[in-house]
Amino acid sequence: MKGRRFIYKRVLYYVIISLLALFALIPFFWMLSTSLKETNALTTIPIQWLPEKVSFSAYTELFTVFPFTRSILNSLFISVVGTFISVMSSAMAAYVFGKIEFKGREVLFTFYLATMMIPGNLLMIPNYLTLRSMGLLDSLVGVLLPSFFNAFGTFLLRQNIKSLPNSFIEAAVIDGASRIKVFFKIILPLVKPAVTTVTVLTFMGNWNAYLWPLIVLTSKENMTLTVGLSLLNGQYGTDYNLLMAGAIISIIPMIVVYAFSQKHIEVGFNVGSLK
Amino acid sequence: MLISLNKRRKRFEILFFLAPSLFGLILFQLIPFGNSLYLSLTDWDVLSDANFIGLQNYSDILRSSEFWKVLSNTFYFIILYIPGIIIVSLGLASLLNVNAPGKKFFRVVFYIPVLTSWVAAALLWRWLLSPYYGPINEILSFFGLTGPSWLYDKNWAMPGIVIASLWKDMGYFGLIFLSALQSIDKTYYEAARMDGASSLKVFFKITLPMISPTMFFVTIISIINSFQLFPQVMIMTEGGPFGSTQVMVERIYSYAFDYYKMGYASAFSWILFVFIFIATVVQLYFQKRWVHYEG
């Protein structure tokens, strides 16, 4: 009897979780299916769940109607360089806040953290104007500049660096090693897991960023993938095969990153939620 | 002599390490924070010089019917979204908390929407919700239901955006609930089972009270996020139809970068900031109390 009840429960369990999984996956199935259709197959009644004729024309068209390769490269550039700047800058600050004593340190650190309360939407207008006065509008460098400050990364790395044993860091400093050397040779290697977490999260954030690059970048040649997709949407708003092909291309790097660093991403998001 | 040299070296090194983040902090956080406040008190429109007009922008916004409409749209989103996201993500977490084969696979499945950019997700959902050519209404018609026109209907556009948001966020909040569930001491459950409590009773008497801090946290974060809806609205509806999905950030963006009313848009963003600030303070206050309570 008990065995049968267990089986019923299991069946019910898989029915419910599969329904939820369908809710998560059907949209992606539809995305893929649409991207493989020709334009005239988009508006048939009834709809074609699977394309009657599989065609890759949407993918090839994507690269001809829009400098798509360029926007992929721009996105890569912003994600890689922006992440490097952000992680280095926050790791350096985290070392100071975690290990180097000086007067006013805690006040300054509180200041760093307090900025997390300022929404990015408040800063976008004045930051746009700053770039404008610097002549950096419509440039990738302009998009990158705010990356120098990353309160969340600083906070997370500081927690890790603070918990490192003082003894051999101090010993190295007393032995005459500069703190710069200590930072690169001792600190960074010891907090590698936390650095990886911040790196992956920042990379994903940069790759998927929309509002800030949308404001800064205006010419087709400078657009990132997200901004390019939304521009494409403005021009080819009903050519969903084109839009879905672009969307799929934009997701692939994220899936790859996730496949290699699932633990880091999930741990990081949880820490992020407790900040 | 040696000590002062060391001190100077230390000072130099501290500056060296803080320089990049201070550059970002000052130039892209502090100065713009002040600038934004100043701008909100002017009528600057990029083309002509800025005039100081005091609180004129604020009173204009608060007296416009548009602002109250935007606010009520936001609350409508919140009222639909928050119960939805709590039920879906807590349900998801409970399912993933069961020790059954395939758990890892499902965990990945629910996470893919979280990895997707909002731009891609919003394009996808606009297409999914297409009244005639989209699969959602096709599925509804399979069950004999006639689906609404979704994003083209002022009563259904916001629910459409809510569904897309639930889809996108459920994996994220699901994992947060999952780690809350996993941190509950197993002995509570064993004791309850010994007393013969039903699983429904166990859920309401043990699980729910134990995860209430997480529930509270998810609620506050969702409220903060709801006030800052942007890409889904921008791409799915552009605020339409008939302004039924206009929300704050979309308005701010439009005033600033379509009409160049920088002063007005800045004042709008300060009003938004006040809402977010209140939510954040509430969260910090209760978070502290809960930590004390548990300790």
Image (cartoon, rainbow, N blue to C red):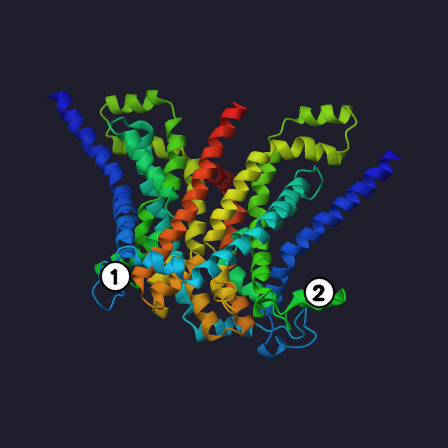
> Looking at the picture, does residue A257 appear above or below residue B135?
above
Residue A97, by quadrant, is top left
**Residue beneath the point at 42% across and 49% down:** A203
Question: Are the residues flagged by discs 1 and 2 from a single subunit?
Answer: no
- Outermost residue on the bottom side: it is A40
Asked whether residue A274 is in view, the answer is yes
- Please name the amino acid that badge 1 sits on: Arg
Asked whether residue B230 is in view, the answer is no
The residue marked by circle 1 belongs to what chain? A
Q: Nearer the viewer, residue B244 or B113?
A: B244
| Quadrant assignment for the N terminus of chain B | top left
Disc 1 and disc 2: Cα gap in Å? Answer: 49 Å
Residue A53: percent from left, percent from top: 65, 75
At numbered mark 2, what does the secondary structure look like: helix, strand or loop? Answer: helix
- Image position of A131 (left or right of B223): left
> Looking at the picture, does residue A213 appear above or below residue B3?
below
- Image position of B240 (left or right of B27): right
- Please name the amino acid that badge 2 sits on: Ile
- Outermost residue on the left side: it is B1
Which residue is the site of mark 2? B139
Residue B62 is tagged as none
> Looking at the picture, does residue A267 appear above or below residue A219?
above
> Looking at the picture, does residue B25 appear above or below residue A159?
below
Which residue is the site of mark 1? A132
Residue B155, by quadrant, is bottom right
Residue B227: percent from left, percent from top: 47, 52
Q: Nearer the viewer, residue A104 or A197?
A: A104
Residue B4, by quadrant, is top left
